[in-house]
Image: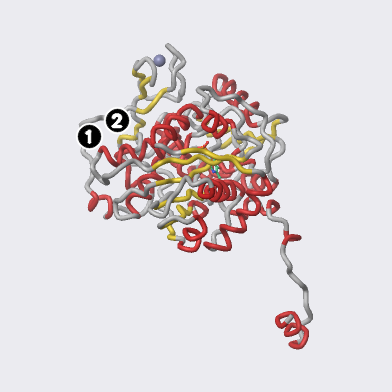
Amino acid sequence: MTVASVEVSPQPVPLACGHCGVTHAPVAQAICPECLGPLEPVYDPTRRLPSREEIASRPPSLWRYREWLPFQGTPVHSLDTGFTPLVEAPRLADLLGVGRLWIKNDTVTHPTLSFKDRVVATAINAAVGLGLRTIACASTGNLAIAVGAHAARAGLPAWVLVPETLEPAKILATAVSGARVLRIRGTYDDVNRLCAQLADRYAWGIVNVNLRPYYGEGSKTVAFEIAEQLGWRLPTAVVAPMAGGSLLSKLHKGFGEIREAGLAGGPAPRLYGAQAAGCAPIAHAVETGASRITPVVPKTIARSLAIGAPADGPRAIHAIRSTGGWAGSVSDPELIEAIRVLAEHTGIFAETAGGVTTAVALKLAQAGRFGPADEVVLCITAHGLKTPDAVSPDQFDIPTVSSRLGDVAKVIEA
Ligand SMILES: *Cc1c(COP(=O)(O)O)cnc(C)c1O
Ligand SMILES: [Zn+2]
């Protein structure tokens, strides 16, 4: 393994505790040593912000919003991530009975086909800026693949810890980039606890553990892209899948920053969170009005969302409640069916998390949560070829026929 080049790496911004307010020099740490509150990046409120035109003139990646990403200086790694298509889907809008509907298509995020490329793009620049030379993560799958890929091209060794039951396609796609993969006997939450201990023992940048303050900010770029791609307008509603609840809470932060900067006006979009019924601690708290999250032991094929003790659950609940949104959960058969519905109406093949998001959107529409005036965005966060076994070929009628015209015509005309 070669060591990352020490070109002028970007300097991560300082952190401050969200509870007690104490500030800390840039550091690989997510929890306030004083009060155990969450550490957050601190942005210079006097920094110069770009205009819409300036943003438009920049390369099509998430770094076009760099003033809202936690660095001083120019990022050197993962410059191709972000700016995925926002695709209008009128047939799906009809099915939901809403005015307009778009898919934020993160199934084609570079380089690993899931929205986790965004958070790893920011985390890896933070790691390099902090002088850390090994990258690691606790993962439900997509993060593993992204950490492996982004670390490989930066020339950094990577350790990736996953629950033993992870889909083989995801383990393979991680190992192929040279990352060391450890399959841990236990749930994601066990793996996560273990990684917190590893962070104390080794000088590693564990992207979603000690680099979490920098990592999470990458998710905000989904909000910035949606607004810019709508011509600097905001949709009325956004539906997003929830695992740890980071994406959903960062959408809230991102839309808030867009409005604060005057880049787009109007009300904040209502945020809707989607989970699988077999692991729905955040959705359950929203639906029952609970003030606390009750952790669960996950039991669903939507493994990318299977976090039973969601770190950003309380923030996701706050984002949902304060925007007038809601949450929902769907069974495994419902999410599998919705993978087909999404593909049949948009041509986009999503993994299980996309099935969850689509199925929850359909359910919320049936419950009257959306109206004909609504302009809805569905965040579809990873590609279907990552979980091909979720959609069994047995459910399709795919005959094998001889190469004789007559035989083929018989099938076509039947
Ligand atoms: C990780 C992940 C999410 C959301 O994760 P959060 O922890 O809630 O930010 C959504 N979709 C996919 C496919 C993921 O891998
Ligand atoms: Zn504190």
Q: Is residue 79 above or below residue 94?
A: above
Q: Is residue 128 visible?
A: no
Residue name at image x 77 percent, y 86 percent: 404
Q: Residue furthest front?
A: 368
Decide if ligand 2 comes within 8 Å of the CB at mark 1: no
Left or right position of 228 against 134: left
Q: Amino acid at mark 2?
A: Tyr
Residue at image x 65%, y 26%?
190
Quadrant of the drawing holding the C terminus: bottom right
Q: Do labels 1 and 2 touch, CB within 8 Å?
A: yes
> Which residue is label 1 attached to?
47
Q: Secondary structure at mark 1?
A: loop
Residue 111 versus residue 283 in the image, above or below: below
Up-down relation of residue 379 to residue 291 (above or below): below
Q: Position of residue 204 (x, y in %)?
A: 52, 28
Residue extending furthest toward the bottom: 406
Would you name the residue on which mark 2 appears?
43
Horizontal and vertical percent for residue 405? 74, 87
Residue 251 visible here: yes
Q: Residue at x 57, y 23 (%)?
A: 196
Write the residue at 71% across / 38% down: 165
Image coordinates of residue 412 in percent, x first then y, are: 70, 81
Camera-nearest residue between 187 and 1: 187
**Horizontal and vertical percent for residue 1?**
56, 40
CA gap between label 1 and label 2 equals 8 Å
Is disc 2 placed on a helix, strand or loop?
loop
Asked if residue 353 lies left or right of residue 105, the reply is right
Query: Type of residue at label 1?
Result: Arg
Above-or-below relation of 26 to 181? above
Q: Which label number is shown at residue 345?
A: none
The image quarter in which residue 88 lies: bottom left
